Amino acid sequence: MSESRKLHIHMSVDNIEESIQFYNTQFGAEATKVKEDYAQWIVEDLSLNFAISTRGNKKGVNHLGVQYESDEALEKAQSTFEEAGIKGQEEKGATCCYKESNKYWVKDPTGNMWENYHSMDDIEVYGMEESESSDACCSPKVGMFSTTPNSGCC
């Protein structure tokens, strides 16, 4: 692919302040976005979008993903998955992790969810489903993948 992509990793943590200090040191850079329950690092020399939050019921890796620079690149990736027989779930205009994004969720053979996405705008809320559960915004909606329950957030 000719467009730039970034690996996305989101981890659920116990203590946001201690974790921000640790990851500032780990990446040799200050977080690019900090909220009371969330922080994000865009680390260009690693092509990495790394996020942490106090959201999510399980601590550790929340989900994995690939951030695309445009909707066209995301649509091309979606076509590539589908041509390979990997059926996912499209989600347009999702509000999650203080962003509005278009997404295409897929599940790897082990059952790990991958969020392929292009973010359009920053927003001032973590996600629209905040009242439903602490980790509902950045995972495929319940029933999206009939064999996998809702499992995490971005």
Image (spheres, rainbow, N blue to C red):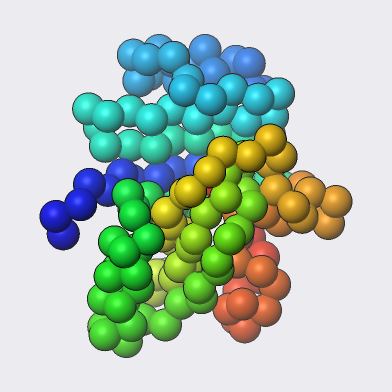
Whether 105 is drawn above or below 36: the answer is below
Query: Is residue 112 found left or right of 67 in the rendered image?
Result: right
Q: Residue 44 occupies which quadrant of the picture?
A: top left
> Residue 106 location in percent, x, y?
44, 70
Asked if residue 68 can be seen in this view, the reply is yes
Q: Nearer the viewer, residue 34 or 76?
A: 76
Query: Is residue 104 found left or right of 98 in the rendered image?
Result: left
Q: Nearer the viewer, residue 95 or 120?
A: 120
Count of marks placed on residues? 0
**Residue at the (85%, 51%) spot, across then down:** 131
Asked if residue 55 can be seen in this view, the reply is no
**Residue at the (29%, 61%) spot, across then down:** 73
> Residue 114 location in percent, x, y?
44, 61
Q: Nearer the viewer, residue 106 or 119?
A: 119
Q: Nearer the viewer, residue 64 or 94?
A: 94
In the displayed orientation, state which residue is furthest to the right: 131
Q: Quadrant of the N terminus?
A: bottom left
Whether 145 is drawn above or below 126: the answer is below
In the displayed orientation, state which residue is furthest to the left: 2
**Residue at the (62%, 30%) spot, across then down:** 38
Whether 84 is drawn above or below 113: the answer is below
Whether 104 is drawn above or below 146: the answer is above
Query: Is residue 4 found left or right of 27 in the rendered image?
Result: left
> Residue 69 location in percent, x, y?
32, 49
**Residue at the (47%, 49%) spot, across then down:** 119
> Residue 95 location in percent, x, y?
64, 52
